Image (cartoon, grey):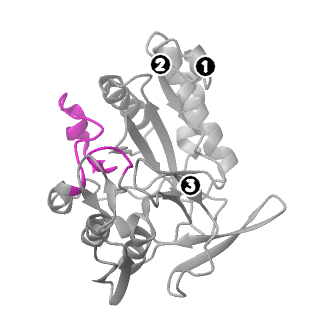
Amino acid sequence: MTTTKRIRAGGRTVEISRPDKVMFPADGFTKADVAHYYRTIAPRMLPQLRGRPLMLERRPDGIDGTMFMQKDVPEYFPDWVHRAELPKEGGTVTYPICDGAATLVYLAGQACLTPHRFLSKADRPDHPDRVVFDLDPSGDEFEPARRTALLLRALLEDELGLPSLVMTTGSRGLHVLVPLDRSAPFAQTRAFAHEVADLLATRHPDRLTTAARKQAREGRLYLDVQRNAYAQTAVAPYAVRALPGAPVAAPCSWADVEDPTLTARRWDITTVDTLLDHDAWRPTPRGRSLRAAHRRLDALTRRA
């Protein structure tokens, strides 16, 4: 077994220890395979990560082994891995920030399969530039998430005047995101997300719910907006998921979502060329204020 492997990325040579370590036993994908995927996808992924604190999902023994989530940057991380020290209750946390391809490859070498990103950037951590709706089916069936995403898009774009983006999670569902201009703090964006979810659930009570307790969902799709808070994270676009087949969370177009054959795991580390060829989030809509949308939402809620 090769003990180390050097990969050139972002103008640096990154040394990967135990590159032949199998991370996905059923598929044979190794740590080196994951590192090569991240080096290749870097042109698409880095714009979604720059300036954002990350939480690292690390699996040193592969997807069937122990998993732990890491926020604080270990002392042994190289100096060129950027950091941001941010407040928490009773102290601070020093988060990693991925601003270059070398960092993506280095994190893969540290058995970080899945980076999870803040909805805000480190320079204004209390002011998000995204609202995210996590469409989480109650079972393994993907179709409810696909249908709900289209309903949510119609509400956001046609009734509230807000552009929206969509991505598969690489797991079970979809994330629908609204780009923001960072004028509102989390308290306001979280309240807005709750009100949107409540209105959609009121319109479709037999199919949708905002009940956080699984026992209360009764088979309905959960409209999860809990990630819209300071220091909460969501899976990063293009991140590898710790599931058989090495699926990835992939930005997609609304035309993709209209296709009934879409699944949450359509794209994986072997389809990286397809992800590079098709930038589903271009052109990216500019971030918006929620002020006008909130007035429209209040009027809709009163009539519901």
**SS assignment at label 2:** strand
Residue 156 in sight from this viewpoint: yes
Confirm or deny contact between disc 1 and disc 2 (CB under 8 A): no
Which residue has dot 1 on it? 302
Dividing the picture into quarters, in which one does residue 94 lie? bottom right
Judging by the rendered image, the residue that carries numbered circle 3 is: 68
- Residue 99 drawn above or below residue 198: below
Residue 111, position in %: x, y? 43, 64
Is residue 248 located in the magenta-colored stretch of the structure? Answer: yes
Q: Residues within 10 Å of mark 3 (few under 14, many from 20)?
A: few
Q: Nearer the viewer, mark 2 or mark 3?
A: 3
Marks 1 and 2, Cα distance to the nearest angstrom?
19 Å
Assess disc 2: are there few (<14), some (14-19) or many (≥20) residues with their C-alpha within 10 Å of its C-alpha: many
Binning the other alpha carbons within 10 Å of mark 1 as few (below 14), some (14 to 19) or many (20 upward) gives: few
Q: Are marks 2 and 3 in contact (CB under 8 Å)?
A: no
Closer to the chain start, of discs 2 and 3, is: 3
- Against 148, residue 182 (above or below) is below
Give the distance between the C-alpha atoms of the residues marked 3 and 1, in whole angstroms: 44 Å
Q: Badges 3 and 1: C-beta atoms under 8 Å apart?
A: no
The mark found on residue 112 in the picture is: none
Horizontal relation, residue 252 to residue 243: left or right? left
Badge 2 amino acid: Leu
Who comes first in sequence, dot 1 or dot 2? 2
Total of numbered circles in the picture? 3
- The residue carrying mark 2 is 208
Distance, label 2 to label 3, CA atoms, is 32 Å
Magenta residues, start to end: 241-269
Residue at the spot 52% in from the left edge and 52% down from the top edge: 67
